[in-house]
Image (spheres, rainbow, N blue to C red):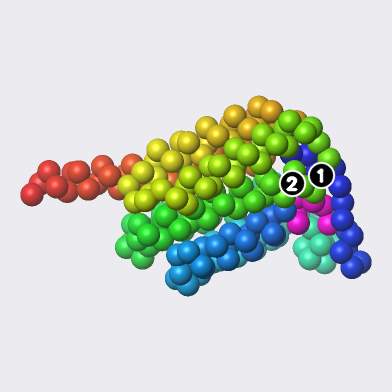
Amino acid sequence: MLVTKLYVIGNITVPSNWIALIVAFIIAYSIIRLRLGKVSATLFSDAVFYIIIIWKLSVIITDFSTVIRAPISIVYFNGGFTGFCLGLLFVAGRIWFDWIRGKVDKESLVALFTGAVTVQTIFQVMMVLLNKGSLIAGIGTVVIFIALTFFVWRIEQIGDHIALISMLFMAAHIFVATIQPKGLLNPPLFITLIIGVFFIAIFKVTKVQTERGSGFE
C-alpha cells in the first residue's frame, strides 16, 4: 500500500510506514514471547535490532555526501529501502552462519519464520488502516495476509514444511501485490521474496546434507 499520510508525534513528523513497521515488530515480538517463549522472542528481537541499526547507519553508504557535510544527519536519516535490505541480508547471513555452527536450531528458525510472516501481515494491515487507498485492495490485503498468518500459526510440525510454506508466503504476497497500487514493483514484496528464498535455501541445504549423511551409514 502507498504512504498517503504523515503523522505528527511530538515534534517529529513520521510517515505511516514507520509507524506500521514499529507496531508490527512490537506485536510480533509479543506473540512470539507468549506462544514460543523467551528464548525464541530474544532471538527475534536480536534480529530486529540488527536490521534497525544497519538500516539507520547505512545512510553513510546511501547518502555519504550528506553525512560528510552534516554528521548529525545520521540521527535523523536512514538508508531507506536499500539500507533495510542490507540489514535483512546481514541478519540472514548471520543466522545461516550460526545454523552451520549449531548455534541455532530448527525451533529457532521456525520462530524467526513465523515472526517474519507475522511482521509482514501486521505491517500490511497497519498500512491499510493508516493510509487512504482502494477499498478492494485494502480488503484483499487484510483478508489474505490474516488468513495466511492464521494458517502458519495453526499448522503443526511447521519445521518440516518450511520450504513449502515459504513458497505459499511468497505466492500469497505476489497475488496481493497485483491488486495493490505499485503492483509487483512493491518494496515489501521484495522483502518477502528475500525472506522466502532464504528459508527455502537453508532448509533445502539442510535436507540434502542430512540425506547425504544418512547415505554413508
Q: Toward which corner of the image does residue 105 lie, by quadrant?
A: bottom left
**Looking at numbered disc 2 in the image, what kind of residue is underneath it?**
Met
Q: Position of residue 102 (x, y in %)?
A: 32, 63
Q: Toward which corner of the image does residue 50 lie, by quadrant?
A: bottom right
Tell me, yes or no, if residue 217 can be seen here. Answer: yes
Of the 4 image quadrants, the one containing the N terminus is top right
Q: Position of residue 70 (x, y in %)?
A: 85, 62
The secondary element bearing badge 2 is classed as helix
Compared to 180, does 99 lie above or below?
below
Q: Residue at x 59, y 45 (%)?
A: 146
The secondary element bearing badge 1 is classed as loop
Magenta stretch? 14-19
Compared to 33, does 99 lie above or below?
above
Compared to 81, does 46 lie above or below?
below
Compared to 130, does 182 lie above or below?
above
Question: Along the line of sight, which residue is nearer the eye, 165 or 81?
Answer: 165
Q: Residues within 10 Å of mark 2 (few under 14, many from 20)?
A: many
Tell me, yes or no, if residue 197 can be seen here. Answer: no
| Label number found at residue 131 | 1
Q: Residue at x 61, y 47 (%)?
A: 121
**Looking at numbered disc 1 in the image, what kind of residue is underneath it?**
Asn
Q: Position of residue 217 (x, y in %)?
A: 8, 49
Q: Position of residue 71 (x, y in %)?
A: 81, 65
Q: Toward which corner of the image does residue 162 lie, by quadrant?
A: top left
Report which residue position mark 2 lands on: 127
Total count of labels: 2
Q: Residue at x 64, y 63 (%)?
A: 26
